[in-house]
């Protein structure tokens, strides 16, 4: 059964929220702000919410969430467990074979070589097999394969991700060692999803620890795709590996989940008793369609929830001026320890296009993805 819990996903002043902080603090108690952001002098942060914020903004562990899972508590899944539909194949075609059709062409017939470039609203397509510029193995740029030609670049010359030739299965991937190495894409109109429908899907594996000693802040989650405002309530899309829950007394612990938020009060997590920081590759997607936000793992919806509306329309998540951060946040915050092979972001995708994207990624990485999570 697909887990659906509106109370666990979207919060009010009476029900606390995670308030994940894309620009969380270091040990000195001062806010870590994006370059060019205006610091909030009255909201210095030491890793916990200010007392005056506790009642209205302190998150609680959702009532249907499990106790903090760890590798010892999580149920073992059989090696051949599947949590999603196997991508269609023709005959004995192997993974990536050109006889697989994941979409249709302009004439409505199956398109053998369907790829994300066929998506009408393609905003970003990062593929580690194309467009990665390196010096040795160090990544100096990851060039977008869409017509927007975005460039993801490292802001710190001394903290660089590396390109692994076989980072996810036999596919190349950009590896983030968990020390603050990151890539950032400057803001651009094509990256502002506003109040439109969107889907961001990636192929990722990670082993980000829930007690993180290699990152400068005390936030123990990893940044996967973060484009959000620097100040509370941090409006914008943010996808994370690991998730910390809070209540008025403090942290309830860090969980090895995947999660996404539209701001600090409106979020969704996997919550399916699966330990996701096990370094196994998965296709992870977050999608907003009309008034529903959903998380999918390997093509299967794990959690869905109703999205709050602003003045009769969906919440605007443009986050003007904020770029897309991948692998960490500025000032060595939210350091991901893991590898990403591909990221695809699409606005206003049809249901059929979303299915085509799932099919494409699941088939392409079929030999690497370990389907060990299933909806409960």
Image (cartoon, rainbow, N blue to C red):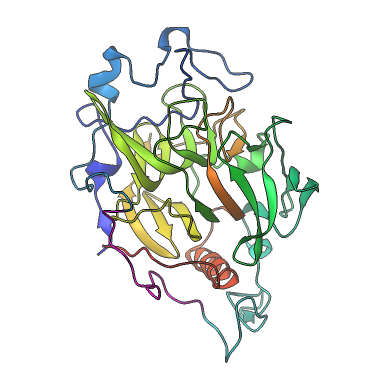
Q: Magenta stretch?
A: 72-87
Q: Residue at x 40, y 36 (%)?
A: 211
Quadrant for residue 328, please give it: top right
Along the line of sight, which residue is nearer the eye, 117 or 296? Answer: 296
Q: Is residue 86 magenta?
A: yes
- Extreme residue toward the right, this view: 135
The answer to whether residue 307 is seen in the rendering is no
- The number of numbered badges drawn on the structure is 0
Position in image of residue 143 (x %, y %): 74, 48
Q: Locate the N terminus and report the quarter of the image it occupies.
A: bottom left
- Residue 82 against residue 233 in the figure, above or below: below
In the foreground, 99 or 356: 99
Query: Which quadrant does the C terminus fall into?
Result: bottom left
- In this rendering, the answer to whether 326 lies above or below 105 is above
* The furthest residue to the top: 41
Residue 245, by quadrant, is: top left
Nearest to the observer: residue 31 or residue 113: 31
Pick out the residue farthest to the bottom: 91
Q: Pick the residue in front: 228 or 314.
A: 228
| Rendered residue at 65%/34% (across/down) | 187
Instruction: Indicate the position of residue 73 as horizontal and vertical percent values.
Output: 26, 54
* Main SS category, magenta section: loop
Residue 5 at least partly seen: yes
Q: List x then y, in percent, for residue 4.
A: 26, 54
- Establish if 52 lies above or below 66: above
On the image, the x and y values in percent for residue 40 come to 48, 12
Does 85 appear above or below 30? below
Look at 68% across and 75% down and name the residue there: 113
Residue 13 colored magenta?
no
- Looking at the image, which residue is at 75% across and 58% down? 130
């Amino acid at each position: 059964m697909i887990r659906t819990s509106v109370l666990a996903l979207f919060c009010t002043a009476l029900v606390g929220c995670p308030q994940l902080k894309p620009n969380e603090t270091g040990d000195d108690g001062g806010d870590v702000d994006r370059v060019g952001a205006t610091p909030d002098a009255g909201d210095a942060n030491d890793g916990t919410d200010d007392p005056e914020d506790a009642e209205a903004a302190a998150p609680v562990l959702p009532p249907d969430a499990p106790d903090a899972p760890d590798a010892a508590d999580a149920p073992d899944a059989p090696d051949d467990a599947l949590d999603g539909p196997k991508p269609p194949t023709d005959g004995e075609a192997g993974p990536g074979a050109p006889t697989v059709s994941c979409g249709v062409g302009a004439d409505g017939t199956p398109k053998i070589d369907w790829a994300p470039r066929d998506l009408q609203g393609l905003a970003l397509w990062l593929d580690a097999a194309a467009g990665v510029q390196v010096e040795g193995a160090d990544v100096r740029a990851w060039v977008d394969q869409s017509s927007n030609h975005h460039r993801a670049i490292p802001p710190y010359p001394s903290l660089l991700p590396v390109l692994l030739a076989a980072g996810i299965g036999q596919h190349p991937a950009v590896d983030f060692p968990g020390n603050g190495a990151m890539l950032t894409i400057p803001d651009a109109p094509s990256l502002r999803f506003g109040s439109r429908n969107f889907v961001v899907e990636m192929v990722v594996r990670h082993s980000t620890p829930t007690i993180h000693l290699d990152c400068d802040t005390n936030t123990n989650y990893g940044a996967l795709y973060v484009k959000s405002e620097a100040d509370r309530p941090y409006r914008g899309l943010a996808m994370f590996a690991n998730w910390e829950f809070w209540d008025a007394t403090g942290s309830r612990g860090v969980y090895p989940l995947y999660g996404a938020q539209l701001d600090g009060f409106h979020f969704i997590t996997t919550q399916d008793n699966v330990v996701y920081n096990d370094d196994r590759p998965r296709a992870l997607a977050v999608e907003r369609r009309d008034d529903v936000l959903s998380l999918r793992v390997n093509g299967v919806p794990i959690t869905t929830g109703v999205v709050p509306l602003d003045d009769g329309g969906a919440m605007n998540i443009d986050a003007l001026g904020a770029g897309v951060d991948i692998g960490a946040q500025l000032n060595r915050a939210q350091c991901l320890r893991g590898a990403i092979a591909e990221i695809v972001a699409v606005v206003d995708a049809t249901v059929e296009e979303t299915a085509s994207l799932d099919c494409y990624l699941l088939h392409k990485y079929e030999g690497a993805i370990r389907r060990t999570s299933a909806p409960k």
